[in-house]
Amino acid sequence: MDVSNLAEHEVSEIIQMALCDHTSFAQIKMQYGLSDKQVKQLMRENLKPSSYRTWRTRVRKFSDRRESYK
């Protein structure tokens, strides 16, 4: 699915899912067909730059911690 073809409510839902620490990129891909790169693009376009950087930092740290729980 192309990011530009998403309805406003879908963009909002994807942003909420991405901001949630319990939702993975794989879950977003299953529901909306977007790759992690497309989700990052969508977030970059819809969040303030500082909010995007904070989110990316959180996602990286959370994924690092998740590796140790497997």
Image (spheres, rainbow, N blue to C red):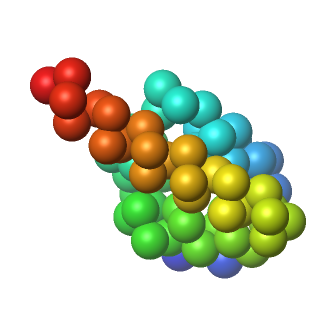
Q: Is residue 41 above or below residue 52?
A: below
Q: Nearer the viewer, residue 4 or 69?
A: 69
Q: Is residue 7 above or below residue 59?
A: below
Q: Is residue 60 left or right of residue 69?
A: right
Q: Nearer the viewer, residue 25 or 12?
A: 25
Q: Position of residue 37 (x, y in %)?
A: 44, 71
User: Residue farthest to the right?
Assistant: 48
Quadrant location, the C terminus: top left
Residue at image point 79% right, 70% down:
49
Residue at image point 67% right, 63% down:
53
Q: How many marks?
A: 0
Occupied quadrant, residue 54: bottom right
Q: Nearer the viewer, residue 8 or 66?
A: 66
Residue at image point 48% right, 26% down:
22
Q: Is residue 1 visible?
A: no
Q: Is residue 21 visible?
A: yes
Q: Position of residue 28 (x, y in %)?
A: 45, 45
Q: Is residue 50 left or right of residue 14?
A: right
Q: Nearer the viewer, residue 49 or 47?
A: 49
Q: Is residue 56 left or right of residue 49?
A: left
Q: Is residue 9 above or below residue 51?
A: above
User: Residue farthest to the left?
Assistant: 70
Residue at image point 21% right, 36% down:
67
Q: Position of residue 10 (x, y in %)?
A: 69, 50
Q: Position of residue 7 (x, y in %)?
A: 74, 59
